Amino acid sequence: MDSSTTSVAFLLTIVGFGTGIALLIRGFISYRAAGRIGDTATSRVATLAAGEVRVTGVIEPAELTLISLLQSEPCVYFRSAVGGDDGLGDALGDDGHVLEERAVGFAVRDASGTIRVFPHDARVEAPVRWEDRTGMLGDEPPGLRWRLGSAFGPNEGDREAAAAALLEIHDPVADPSLTPAGRLDAGSRRRTYRESRLEPGDQVTILGQALPFSDLAHPAEADVGGTADPFADGGDPEIAADLAAARAAGTLLTDPDAAWGNAAIPGFGIGRPVRPATIDPAATPLRPAGPEAAARAKRTFTIAPETLVLASIDDAPLLVTYGSPVAVVERERWRFVQGLLGGALAIGALAIAALLVTGSAR
Amino acid sequence: MSPGAYVASFAVGLVLVIVLFLVITAYNDVMALQRRIDKAWANIEVILKQRHDQLPALVAAVKGLMAFEQDVLTEVTRARAAYAPTDTIPHQAATSDQTSSAVRSLLVTVERYPDIKAAGNVADLQAEIERIEGMLADRRELYNDQVYRYDTRIAQVPTSWLAAVFRWRPRAYFRADPGDAERPDTSLTTDGPA
């Protein structure tokens, strides 16, 4: 065996060893997750008690849904990634370069009721909903529908808005610089896209803490145990100084409607406003939503302080996984088996490396 | 040391790490299971206490209006008085079953008297008792499910080996033993909330 062949073989053994160890570590993590999920009984939402719980049910949108980056699909979580010529997929599930990952609060419904979920700091396991790559000539895959507008959408279908969107004529040659694709490295010849999503209607299993909504450190951001409220006393000193200056100048508004303007109108900007907004006279106003929609919007944005919600806390992150508990446990255990095989791979790679070293020494 | 010896040492070390990981994980899992059972039981106790506190109010609300149904009221009061938080779990389950049965009889009886149902706060109390009964049923199911997972886990290899070392014993389900179903009632008391 010549020296170049030996070098390549040695390099491969190093890669094999690293992959094996990484698989083993992931297997350990999955084994722990399988234990946590499998050893916790499923609670019914209606009779949930505070503390660590496992809930399984169907995702329902709350105030907002997200619009995914690569396929513009409504969802509550997405992770959009792009890879180079070597593809995204490998044994470790590496996503390549993640373009964007977002999650919004949603609700989970089981047979007994509904509970709100705040995914901040959560570990989310979402299925890959779309994966494709550019063609031989660099043409983009047909399923690629870049999101061109806001990342947020209303929580429910608005027939009139959907019809208007369908009838609207779009420029077939959009300015590439306006799309995330335009920001990608133009030198990349072929790209692989992958998007994982959790969508309304998906069955999920959630393991985490049920706690009263009032116990969330910063409910507006669902930030449990994280950054303190910058507006509270002792919060951000710069904001405190601004507030003091505004109070002194008499410009601090205490009425949210006056302070926020149109933003205080439920539905404004994310659907149909529940009352007329103040807009440019030349603009075409949206017809306000009816009383039923207004009442629904009010209900949607109001969570009673004592209502139990699911959220992460400092030492117990929320685990949101796709599928039924049995399916999740099986998936995690299979990863553990893969981890054991990874350990064997590491040993084998090391043995081959030893043989190569011994051979070279001779 | 030769390269082959290094490989052998690594392989043995890796196997030991895996075995150690499995042992530690199994131990931690069983500890977590025990805590979950304790928590599930504590949540049942909360509901049992709530029911214990609510029943006198319901009995008091309907007592004067149900002159001909004193047996039902007596049965509820007796069952309530038998509640003893320090009893064993099967005994508490038997008591709880008797109380649930008596409460169901009372609620069925109340349904026969529209005047009583409409009087004062009877409807509210009835709804509250029904809510508590529903929660008790759900939390009982959750507790028993948790106990099932624990008992199964410590019976399976390799955790069963650890169970023998650490003397982990199966936990009791929240269900009445056959002997407890005929448990004698304690004396009739009509005191207020404990």
Image (cartoon, coloured by chain):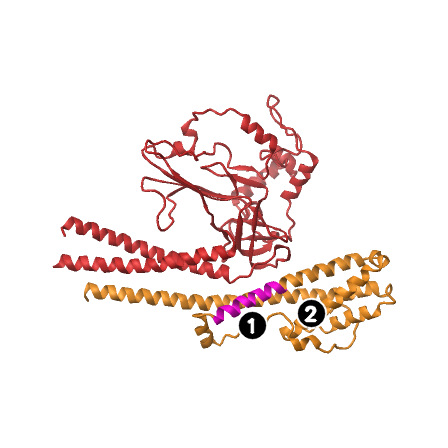
Chain colours: A red, B orange
Query: In the rendered image, which quarter is residue A22 located in?
Result: bottom left
Q: Assess whether residue A106 is covered by the magenta stretch.
A: no
The answer to the question of whether label 1 and label 2 lie on touching residues, with beta carbons closer than 8 A, is no
Judging from the image, mark 1 belongs to the subunit labelled: B
Furthest residue toward left: A362
Secondary element at tag 2:
helix
Question: Where is residue B16 drawn, in percent x and y?
Answer: 34, 67
Amino acid type assigned to the residue bearing label 1 in the image: Arg
| Label 1 to label 2: alpha-carbon separation | 18 Å
Task: Give the extent of the magenta segment.
Answer: B140-155
Residue A308 point in image, percent of width and height: 61, 54
Q: Nearer the viewer, residue B165 or B179?
A: B179
Is A163 located above or below residue B158 in the figure? Answer: above
Residue at (58, 72) in percent of width and height: B172
Q: Quadrant of the N terminus of chain B?
A: bottom left
Confirm whether residue A179 shows in the render: yes
Secondary structure predominantly adopted by residues drawn in magenta: helix
Element carrying mark 1: loop
Mark 1 / mark 2, whichever is N-terminal:
2
Residue B108 lies left or right of residue B65; in this view the side is left
Residue denoted by label 2: B96
Closer to us: A197 or B111: B111
Q: How many discs mark residues in the rendered view?
A: 2
User: Image quarter for residue B45?
Assistant: bottom right
At 66% from the left and 60% from the top, the residue drawn is B135
**Disc 2 marks which amino acid?**
Ser
Q: Give A323 or A78, whichever is nearer the viewer.
A: A323
Residue under label 1: B171
Residue at image position (61%, 39%) is A247
